[in-house]
Image (cartoon, rainbow, N blue to C red):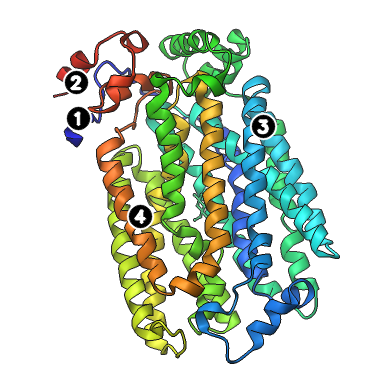
Amino acid sequence: MAGGFVSQTPGVRNYNYKLTPKVFITCFIGAFGGLIFGYDLGISGGVTSMEPFLEEFFPHVYKKMKSAHENEYCRFDSELLTLFTSSLYLAALVSSLFASTITRIFGRKWSMFLGGFTFFVGSAFNGFAQNIAMLLIGRILLGFGVGFANQSVPVYLSEMAPPNLRGAFNNGFQVAIIFGIVVATIINYFTAQMKGNIGWRISLGLACVPAMMIMIGALILPDTPNSLIERGFAEEAKDMLRSLRGTDEVEEEFQDLIDASEESKQVKHPWKNILLPRYRPQLIMTCAIPFFQQLTGINVITFYAPVLFQTLGFGSKASLLSAMVTGIIELLCTFVAVFTVDRFGRRVLFLQGGIQMLISQIAIGAMIGVKFGTVGTGNIGKTDANVIVALICIYVAGFAWSWGPLGWLVPSEISPLEIRSAAQAINVAVNMFFTFLVAQLFLTMLCHMKFGLFFFFAVFVLIMTIFIYLMLPETKNVPIEEMNRVWKAHWFWGRFIPDEAVGVSAAELQQKAV
Ligand code: BGC
């Protein structure tokens, strides 16, 4: 069945370029776009477990936290506190939809710039917050920034990179996200020890640093050849392609970009067109991948790690430290994806990572269940707590080389030019919506489902692994503007792609693939 997928689709060109310093530097700076998202993800969990912060803005949570009689699973359950964390994701959802138009009409770099700018203003509101309103406004502005950046950066990286290294370069975005998380966690570790309100203000205010990095980066970066052609600058695009690829022999790729652009000109309304049957595979994938990425349950660890570790009986300092350890492991393991994604392909990583996450989640659920039971009171011994941290690290590692980076890579590379911006906006919007849901519901779910929460996510990991096995064709090394052939050759999706989109029939492609 999955035999219907082909690792190297017949008829797909392979340009085989070498790595040039220009493409490396451009993608390196472009990937900074992930820093703002990562910084925010890493800072929120730590700040919401800082006592002076809770005392100032969420006194009832503070009181509850101090109460010795509180059920372990429910210590932090508060709608308002989760609203603080998750308001950002709703704002990002909305802004990603606007970002798609800016990305298409003005180019990828201006969406990146706007992302940095709004994030910068948001960081000032948060750092100087005097009341909940300022805190929430700041958070919404940060969300706008994340929406713009996440919509434009993955597409930017996928278009800049040579096809044979696209996976590695695009994964730079996830590396930046995790780097942002780790730096934020380290900052939290120190600021949490400061007396009074200064600690959380520094944590939230320092978000201005990654914001400035992406703003400056966006100003100096060139736009992608694909976007230049889309906006009518064909000559500039060709020059850009030559300097990016380090050779004058770019005719084939250039022609592919021109063809893709011609095709895309037929499409006036990307938002309406993406609903046409011929874009069904891309539409389903751009919805399913972010949905599944969030349903791995990763953000339970990412932004609630300190809270989760405190629930498990770690002290507040030890909790931040453990969160730091999981962050560093996630960062290191993301490099596994960087170095293997273009060699082994996307499917192998998705499947291996999925199985690893599944096993570790079941083990974590079982251990917490045995220790806390359904009552939720009890103490966890040092050894058991360490085993749980180790299992969490195994789970995080699995995510780090599969659904983390691939959740951004695959949606950004599977769509033809005419719907690429809209598809990426859908990817971000779905991702943010489910990040919001998990953020909003996690503490309540932990309170009610208790250790069953881990089994809940494990069921989804099982479903998504089967889904990838059956439905996702391999896209490694396939030039981005030739992706239609991959869909056409797939046992299920082939029926949606018209012959004229690839110039061959599905039967011919599938026959050659056997
Ligand atoms: C996901 C985030 C997650 C982060 C770190 C990203 O790919 O989209 O939701 O928090 O990885 O694990």
In the image shown, does 403 or 425 lie closer to the viewer?
425
In the picture of the structure, the residue carrying the numbered disc 3 is: 98
Q: Name the residue: 51% across, 25% down.
A: 420
Asked if the residue at tag 1 contacts the one at tag 4, i.e. Cβ–Cβ closer than 8 Å, the answer is: no
Return the x and y of residue 277 as percentages of the image width and height. 39, 20
10 Å neighbourhood of mark 2: few (<14), some, or many (≥20)?
some
- The amino acid type of the residue labelled 2 equals Gln
First reached walking from the N terminus: tag 4 or tag 3 = 3
10 Å neighbourhood of mark 4: few (<14), some, or many (≥20)?
some
Image vertical order of residue 446 relative to residue 205, above or below: below
- The amino acid type of the residue labelled 3 equals Phe
First reached walking from the N terminus: tag 3 or tag 1 = 1
- The amino acid type of the residue labelled 4 equals Phe
First reached walking from the N terminus: tag 4 or tag 1 = 1
In the picture of the structure, the residue carrying the numbered disc 1 is: 4
Asked if the residue at tag 3 contacts the one at tag 2, i.e. Cβ–Cβ closer than 8 Å, the answer is: no
Q: CA distance from mark 2 to mark 1?
A: 7 Å
As helix, strand or loop, the secondary structure at mark 1 comes to helix
In the image shown, does 13 or 512 lie closer to the viewer?
512
In the picture of the structure, the residue carrying the numbered disc 4 is: 460
Label 1 CB, ligand 1: below 8 Å?
A: no
Q: CA distance from mark 2 to mark 3?
A: 39 Å
As helix, strand or loop, the secondary structure at mark 4 comes to helix
Eye-nearest disc, 4 or 1: 4
Asked if the residue at tag 1 contacts the one at tag 2, i.e. Cβ–Cβ closer than 8 Å, the answer is: yes
10 Å neighbourhood of mark 3: few (<14), some, or many (≥20)?
some
